[in-house]
């Protein structure tokens, strides 16, 4: 969707995430052995040490309803 401005893209993305019940979080990248991945200094515009992961939103637990 490169034909849309970035602000519209962000709005659509947030709306879709709220409908599906998912949010994106930035976490440290890990190798298959579980060790952290280092950032490659030869690519200054890309950070390989962090990746984005989609996580289900936790539903807020409200106050229990009053029994009559």
Image: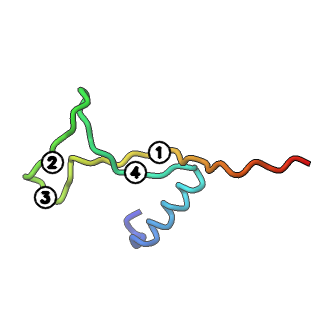
- Image disc number at residue 1: none
Observer-side mark, 2 or 3, equals: 2
Distance from the alpha carbon under mark 4 to that under mark 3 = 22 Å
Instruction: Identify the residue at horizontal 40%, vertical 51% (top origin).
Output: 25
Other residues around mark 1 within 10 Å, as few (<14) / some (14–19) / many (≥20): few
Distance from the alpha carbon under mark 1 to that under mark 2 = 23 Å
Observer-side mark, 4 or 3, equals: 4
Q: Is residue 9 above or below residue 25?
A: below
Kindly state the secondary structure of the residue where label 4 is placed.
strand
Q: Which of the two residues, 64 or 27, is positioned nearer the viewer here?
A: 64
- Mark count: 4
Find the residue positioned furthest to the top. 33
Residue 36, quarter of picture? top left
Distance from the alpha carbon under mark 4 to that under mark 2 = 18 Å
Residue to which mark 4 is pinned: 25
Point out residue 26 in the picture as x, y percentages from the top left corner. 34, 51
Kindly state the secondary structure of the residue where label 3 is placed.
loop
- Image disc number at residue 44: 3
- Image disc number at residue 55: 1
Distance from the alpha carbon under mark 1 to that under mark 4 = 7 Å
């Amino acid at each position: 969707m490169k034909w849309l401005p970035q602000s519209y893209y962000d709005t659509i993305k947030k709306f879709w995430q709220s409908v599906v019940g998912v949010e994106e979080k930035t976490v440290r990248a890990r190798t298959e052995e579980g060790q952290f991945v280092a950032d490659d200094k030869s690519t200054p515009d890309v950070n390989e040490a962090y990746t984005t992961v989609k996580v289900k939103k936790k539903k807020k637990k409200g106050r229990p309803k009053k029994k009559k």
